[in-house]
Amino acid sequence: MTSADATLTLPASLTAAALPLPATRRAGWLRRQARGLVAIALLLVVMFPFLWLVQLAFKPGAEIFEDSLLFVPTLEGFRSLLQGNFLKSFWNSLAVSTLSTGLSLLIGVPAAYALTRWQFRGRRHVALWILVTRMAPPIAFTIPFFLAYRWLGLQDTIAGLAIVYLTFNLAIVIWLMQTFFEAVPTALEEAAYIDGCVVWQAFWRITLPLASPGLAATAVLCFIFSWNDFFYALILTRTNAITAPVAIVNFLQYEGWEWTKIAASGTLVMFPVVIFTVLVRTYLVRGLTAGGVKD
Amino acid sequence: MSTLTAQSGLGWEAARRRAFLWGLLPSLAVLLVITLVPALALLVASFTPLSLTDAAATFHFNDPLVNYRHLLEDERFLRSIATQLKLSISSVALQLAVGLGLALLLNGRSKLLGATRTVFLIPMVLPPIVVALIWKIMYTPDVSPLHRALEAVGLPVRSLIANPDTALWAISIADTWQWFPFTMLMVLATLQMVPDDPLEAASLDGANRWQLFRYIVFPYIRPVLVVCGLFRLIDSFKAFPLIYVLTDGGPGTVTEVTNYYGFIQAFNFSYWGYASAIAMVMLAGVFMLSWLVGRLGWNDHDKR
Amino acid sequence: MAALSLHQIVKHYGSTPVIHGVDIAIQDGEFVALVGPSGCGKSTLLRAIAGLEAISSGEIRLGGRLINDVAPKDRNIAMVFQNYALYPHMTVAQNLGFSLKLQGEDKASIQRRVDEVAAILGLEKLLDRTPRQLSGGQRQRVAMGRAIVRQPDAFLFDEPLSNLDAKLRVQVRTEIKALHQRLGTTTVYVTHDQVEAMTLADRIVVLKDGVVEQVGAPLELYDRPANAFVAGFIGSPAMNFIPGRLHLDGAARVVTDDGLHLPLAQAPQGRHGDSVLYGARPEHFALEASGDGLAAQVRAVEPTGSETQVAVRLEGGHDILAAFRDRIDVRPGDALWLRPVAAQAHLFDATSGARLN
């Protein structure tokens, strides 16, 4: 770069640091910081109920009805969860969510790819169908599934629950992966065809690796939606396949109002979800509006 | 990319088509089995007075429309629709307002704002049961810091969820708390796409911040707000854990929304036929709204 | 290496025909360029040869074998794409060896072959890099390497140089030509740049709207274009066209409506009074002494170093570009006298564009 490109440098006496801020600039600074300050204030106000739950989980049982925020944190609440059914329900949640995610990806990813590269009439109808499955109130599916599972013996099983979760997870996978596959240029697949691939070889070796971040994000979203489900689990499980969200409710109904236990179990149940969310926050919008909104 | 006008069943094009079909078939088959078949079963069940007490005997079609006729006369059902509408509309309106407000506030590029945006996502991704627990604590006077704070200030308030006049509002607030991040995210994403030029031009022309918002920014985000509203409206029909944990439909049936009423009919009373009819009505409503959402905010997949 | 023949190729997109019965016979080892404006169907034809697009009717034969319904991978052709289409998640070595890996070759022989090809193209030091880390010219060479590795019967190039800057373009062009001389593989090269076609090809196929306008050696197309379109397309700067009427009374000539007389060497096809287009290339104008030939006013002077291009306006408003090897000292506004060289003049029918002389 020649000297002509060098930026003008003011003599030190004229730089901003040396001069006092004029009044208008001072007010401007405050206004700019005001936004951040208001944001933090609102954050504390809005997140207060959430934070209250988390701190309650660490409070010693005796002090629940006290107001003070100063207390010696204890893991008493968490330890009490180890007895009884709760740990098992946590495992069940993990098993069901993983199984459901795996099944949804296995079945949905190839379908998403086919829909992306294959232009056929009736795509719109398929899209609407997928949208409706996502939107339908669970009650519409639980009644038939409940009756069917009684007959099929899938009542209160992990597999049974995972299958039901396909009703919304499959739609999510198909919708999201379509957008990720669209981002892979077809020229790459064509080069692969010439190099010696058949359709699904090119998909496996070229398209899928290039869409893998999207695949990961989709898997996480499926996991979150499965993990969070309450209604299907409530109806379709009893004691064997009971998942964590339902198990917590048992604390409310059968074991009395043990607030630390409730708070502790709530904190545990939400923990994986919050972590995952931070990881995939950019894809969250797409996942939650699957089917309904222009990307 | 060529279209499917190639002739023969031989050849690369045909092979490709077959490959895609094989990829699509499992999903179609599964979706068929787990969505269309249950939907049909629901429809069929709604035409019978099927119930647990005598499943075999009650599975008949002597009077197919008995459930639907009963629905029209069932006061509890009709009240549940009113309750559902009250809850949905108030909650969605609040969500839109809060979401919009926060989006406008947090639309900036600093790291701080970015971090706060992420934290604000939490209510939306929490398991709904946890949200219900959080608000159960907030609404139970013995343990709620809010109640105790109000008491300390000299304004003791009775439990909101035990009071028939305020119960629905309490749920509405909890629901808003849970779902405002959705609108916030959507509006934020759209705000980022507002081009700078019209804003700068108007600013130079002398517009103040309110005018900038009203005439330039708002027209941009109005479609998103509409779609958000519709989306949340449809989703609000599913509201369950909040009601289950906070009020159990009560006091009385004041917070009993249609979804909850259906649940009670199906799994408390085991009137599966009747509950199926309720579910069909809900499904019809959801279908129409989904179709509307699809028309308004269609993803451009099939236009490419 | 094999001969490639396209026989009566027709293609429809839906109900719209885009290729209307194209016949091209390419000999073993020949370098043929497909040129034409956007939308003429050249890329479609290339993709049809590759098997990426289906044809509605016609026959494609490679080495005598009918390959209409054969999958791209079984046609034994290799393609170099406009945007390189290198696999972003693989190294250069993996990109080059991909096709061999799919064929089930063992690691050692793949490595050997990859090294051979890398040596030919000067890619030895880049083998462990990913495409993202390469410059445009390097990527293009890897794309070519990927094609060479397969030792195919034919190379297909789809506008490979359009993404490169001017200087690089000339360089890679020379490399492509050297490669063809070295390997001797049948090559089909699609481009919209007729200079590329002229310098690289043994024969050029000019396409317009899905129809072959002319096939021939570069100089053949240059010296004797079959119609006005080819005449205007081949050659840069382009041929000048002046509309007029054919006069056969006395010496054959073209007379414009404004009374300009444009000379012809001999009587062409056509009748007296026919509407015609007179074509003269910029380098086929001679400077005359004042008063002889056509009066022209200089509008712009563009010296390119090797020649001087002068944009002039003739009487009657006809704008002409003339090019002279010698340096001339003229300025805009000056008056000049030009005479088109009759022996090099081209004559085309005004309506059909067909060549008349």
Image (cartoon, rainbow, N blue to C red):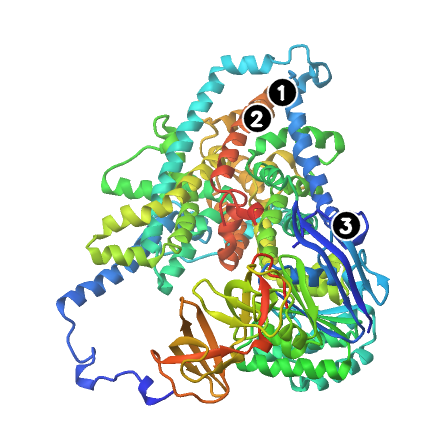
Q: Badges 1 and 3: C-beta atoms under 8 Å apart? A: no
Pointer 2: residues within 10 angstroms few (<14), some, or many (20+)? Answer: many
* Residue for point 59% across, 79% down: C137
Q: Chain letter for mark 2, please.
A: B
Is label 2 on the same chain as label 1?
A: yes
- Work out how far the residue at label 3 is from the one at label 2, CA to CA, in angstroms: 43 Å
- Tag of residue B241: none
Q: Secondary structure at mark 3?
A: helix
Q: In the image, are marks 3 and 2 on the same chain?
A: yes
Left or right: residue B219 versus residue B10 is left
- Give the mark, 3 or 2, whose residue is nearer the N terminus: 3
Quadrant for the C terminus of chain C in the image: bottom right
Residue indicated by mark 1: B46
Which of marks 3 and 1 precedes in the sequence?
Answer: 3
> Which residue has dot 2 on it?
B279
Q: Where is residue B145? Give x, y as percent.
A: 34, 45
The amino acid marked with disc number 3 is: Ala
Tell me if mark 3 has few (under 14), some (14-19) or many (20+) residues whose alpha carbon lies within 10 angstroms of its own. Answer: some
Instruction: Give amino acid for label 2.
Output: Ala
Residue A108 on image: x %, y %: 67, 48
- Mark in front: 3 vs 2: 3
x, y percentage for residue C42?
65, 62
What is the secondary structure assignment of the residue under circle 2?
A: helix
Label 3 sits on residue: B14
**Front residue of this view, candidates A44 and C224:** C224
Residue placed furthest toward the left = A23
Choose top left, top right, bottom left or bottom right for residue C225.
bottom right
Q: Is residue A68 visible?
A: no
Q: Residue at x 42, y 38 (%)?
A: B229
